[in-house]
Structures are given as C-alpha cells and as structure tokens.
Image (tube, rainbow, N blue to C red):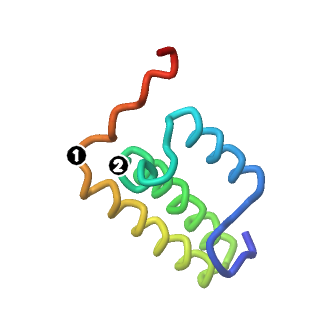
Amino acid sequence: MNEKGVSNNKQMRSVSDRLDSAMGWSGERKDASGARGFIHGVYHGGVGVGKYVWGNSEGAHAEWNRAGEQFSKSKNVGRSPPRSNKNN
C-alpha cells in the first residue's frame, strides 16, 4: 500500500494474466473488451481506497486515475467481442 504509482503486484498480475488468457483477451481484444475494462477499473479503484486508508494519497490518486482509464474503456464498448471456439 506504499507504492506511489499504480499497483503492479506480481501475484495480482498473475491472476490478471490468467484471466486474460481464459477469456481470450489478447492484442486488440484487450482494449475492445468492456468487461475487462470494468474488472480492472474495480480492481484499481479498490486498491486506491486501500492506499487512501493507509495514508498514501499520492498512490490512491494514481490508482483512481488508472481506474478511470479502465472504466472509460468499458463505456465505449457495447459488448465484448465473441470468444473464438478453441474446440474447433
């Protein structure tokens, strides 16, 4: 909670990478997915609250700015692109 910038926790990065892989979010699909933007926005917003509670206002504002960036991706997209069927 002491990071002054945006969180890049290795354990959470691993969870994010696995989610991206499971959902087929790679390349342009990452930016095209409204669901991904929403999930990441919630994460960064929550981390921002945690940093604020611990007295790290600089880090909190960095997280909230990133949350806003992520949420803006979800506003501009109606639906996530369909996943390819990996069984074919």
Q: In the image, what residue type sits under mark 1? A: Gly
**Circles 2 and 1 in contact, beta carbons < 8 Å:** yes
Query: Which residue does the numbered mark 2 point to in the structure image?
Result: 34
Q: Residues within 10 Å of mark 1 (few under 14, many from 20)?
A: few
The percent coordinates of residue 53 (x first, y second) are 63, 69
* Figure disc tally: 2
Which residue extends farthest bottom? 58
Distance, label 2 to label 1, CA atoms, is: 7 Å
Q: Which image quarter is the N terminus in?
A: bottom right
Q: Is residue 77 left or right of residue 7?
A: left
* Disc sitting over residue 56 in the figure: none
User: Circle 2 sits in a helix, a strand or a loop, which is it?
Assistant: helix
Q: Residue at x 69, y 51 (%)?
A: 12
Give the residue drawn at x 60%, y 82%. 57
Image: 24 above or below 10: above
Which residue is depicted at the point 41% across and 31% down?
83
Mark 2 nearby-residue class (10 Å; few <14, some 14–19, many ≥20): many
